[in-house]
Image (cartoon, rainbow, N blue to C red):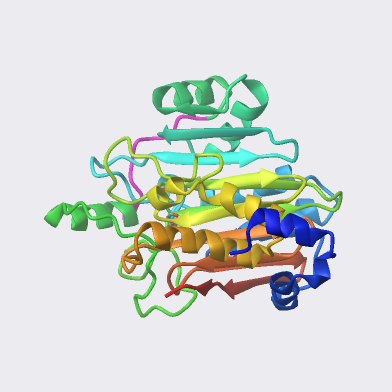
C-alpha cells in the first residue's frame, strides 16, 4: 500500500502520475450526479423511491430516507418488522442516517416500530444525541407519533424461527449467498431462508451533497440485545461531504472491528477510487482474520465526490443496485476477494 507521506509527496506530481489512481479510474464508470446506490436486490425498489426525490433536484438526505423506507415496508423482506427475530422470538431493528453536514442519528434494539430510519432521522434532527436504543428509542418514537405495531412475526419469519428452534444452534452465518439461487437471489428464498437482513444506501444529489442510510433487523436469531454495524456511525455508514459516502452489509462484528465505512471514506480521501477503497477495507478484515474468512461475508459500497461508485466483498454474491436516471436502475455484482 502506498504510504500516506509518500502519497502526499507524489501529490505535487499531479494525480495522473499515480499508477494506482489512473488504473483504478480506468476501471471506474464515469462520474454521475445525481446517483444513488444501495445493497442487494431490494436496492432496485429503494433506489426508485430515492430517485423520485433526486431526479427532481431534491436533497440526498431525503432520498436515502425515502428509499430505504420502501424496504422497511415490505413485510416479507429482510429488513424491518417482517424480518427474522432474535433467538427469543422478537424482531429488533437498527438504523442510522447521515447528512451532508456530518450530522447523524441512529437507533438500535428498537422494537415494534415500522420505520427505524425515520426515527434515526428524528434523533439526528430533534435531539442533542446521536444514538437512542431499546425502550428509550421506542418511547421517543411513540412520542414523535410513530405507531406502536403489534409484537408479531410475519408468516415467513415465524416459519423460519420455528425451523431454527428445532436445533436452536447459535451460529451466525450471514450473507454467504452460495446457495445455488443465482447471483441475484431474493432476500427471502423460496425455502423461507433469509439471505440478508440489511439495506444500506448512499446518494449524491444534484447540488453535490451526500446522504446515507442503513437499516436492518440485524442477524436472524441473534442474541437478544446484539447490535451489528448498521446503527454505528463509521461502521455500517459514513458520509463526509468533502470526500464521499460508504455503507456496508455482512457480518457486522467484523465491520465494527475495522470501523469499516469510516475506513473506506478515509481511503477515498487519500485518493483511492471507491472500488479500491472498498477492496482495501475488505483486505483489512481478511488480514485481521489471518486469511480465515471462508465463513465471513462483508461487502462495502461507496461513492466519491465525482459520482464514481464501487464495491468490494469478501465472498462472491454481494450485489448492489445503481441508479443514475429514471430508467437507469440496475443490479451490479460486486467484485470479491475469495
Ligand atoms: C448486522 N450488517 O447486523 C448487519 C447484517 C447484514 O444482511 O448486513 N445482513 O451485522
The location of residue 105, given as percent across then percent down, is 59, 32
**With 102 as the anchor, is 226 left or right in this view?**
left
**With 109 as the anchor, is 275 left or right in this view?**
right
The location of residue 221, given as percent across then percent down, is 27, 49
Do we see residue 239 in this rendering?
yes
Tell me the magenta residue range.
147-155
**With 304 as the anchor, is 292 left or right in this view?**
left
- Residue farthest to the left, as pictured: 167
Q: Tell which of 126 and 230 is nearer to you.
A: 230
Residue occupying the point 44% across, 21% down: 136
The location of residue 288, given as percent across then percent down, is 39, 56
Residue occupying the point 62% across, 67% down: 276
Work out whether 143 lies above or below 99: above
- The secondary structure that dominates the magenta segment is loop
Work out whether 287 lies above or below 190: above
Q: Tell which of 60 and 267 is nearer to you.
A: 267
Q: Tell which of 141 and 292 is nearer to you.
A: 292
> Is residue 320 part of the magenta span, yes or no?
no
Do we see residue 39 in this rendering?
no
Work out whether 8 lies above or below 146: below
Image quarter of the C terminus: bottom left
**With 301 as the anchor, is 21 left or right in this view?**
right
Residue occupying the point 85% across, 53% down: 206
> Is residue 149 part of the magenta span, yes or no?
yes
Q: Tell which of 269 and 234 is nearer to you.
A: 269
Image quarter of the N terminus: bottom right
The location of residue 89, given as percent across then percent down, is 26, 42
Work out whether 292 lies above or below 165: below
Q: Quadrant of residue 21?
A: bottom right
Query: How many numbered circles does the render carry?
Result: 0
Amino acid at each position: 500500500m502506498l504510504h500516506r507521506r509518500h502519497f502526499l509527496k507524489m501529490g505535487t506530481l499531479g494525480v495522473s502520475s499515480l499508477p494506482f489512481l489512473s488504473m483504478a479510474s480506468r476501471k471506474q464508470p464515469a462520474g454521475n450526479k445525481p446517483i444513488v446506490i444501495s445493497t442487494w436486490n431490494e436496492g432496485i425498489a429503494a433506489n426508485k423511491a430515492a430517485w423520485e426525490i433526486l431526479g427532481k433536484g431534491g436533497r440526498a438526505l431525503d432520498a436515502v430516507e425515502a428509499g430505504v423506507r420502501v424496504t422497511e415496508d415490505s413485510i416479507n423482506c429482510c429488513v424491518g418488522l417482517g424480518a427474522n427475530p432474535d433467538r427469543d422470538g422478537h424482531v429488533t431493528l437498527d438504523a442510522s442516517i447521515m447528512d451532508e453536514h456530518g450530522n447523524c442519528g441512529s437507533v438500535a434494539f428498537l422494537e415494534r416500530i415500522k420505520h427505524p430510519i425515520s426515527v434515526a432521522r428524528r434523533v439526528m434532527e430533534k435531539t442533542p444525541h446521536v444514538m437512542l436504543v431499546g425502550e428509550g428509542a421506542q418511547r421517543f418514537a411513540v412520542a414523535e407519533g410513530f405507531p406502536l405495531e403489534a409484537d408479531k412475526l410475519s408468516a415467513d419469519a415465524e416459519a423460519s424461527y420455528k425451523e431454527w428452534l428445532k436445533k436452536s444452534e447459535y451460529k451466525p452465518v450471514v450473507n454467504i449467498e452460495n446457495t445455488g439461487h443465482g447471483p441475484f437471489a431474493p432476500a427471502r428464498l423460496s425455502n423461507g431462508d433469509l439471505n440478508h437482513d440489511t439495506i444500506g444506501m448512499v446518494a449524491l444529489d444534484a447540488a453535490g451533497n451526500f446522504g446515507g442510510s442503513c437499516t436492518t433487523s440485524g442477524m436472524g436469531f441473534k442474541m437478544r440485545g446484539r447490535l451489528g454495524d448498521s446503527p454505528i456511525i463509521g461502521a455500517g455508514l459514513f458520509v463526509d461531504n468533502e470526500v464521499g459516502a460508504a455503507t456496508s452489509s455482512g457480518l457486522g462484528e467484523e465491520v465494527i472491528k475495522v470501523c469499516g465505512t469510516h475506513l473506506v471514506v478515509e481511503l477515498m480521501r487519500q485518493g483511492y477510487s471507491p472500488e479500491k477503497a472498498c477492496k482495501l477495507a475488505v483486505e483489512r478484515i481478511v488480514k485481521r482474520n489471518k486469511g480465515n474468512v471462508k465463513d465471513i461475508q462483508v461487502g462495502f459500497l461507496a461513492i466519491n465526490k465525482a459520482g464514481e461508485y464501487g464495491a468490494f466483498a469478501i465472498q462472491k454474491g454481494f450485489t448492489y443496485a445503481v441508479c443514475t436516471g429514471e430508467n437507469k436502475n440496475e443490479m451490479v455484482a460486486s467484485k470479491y476477494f475469495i
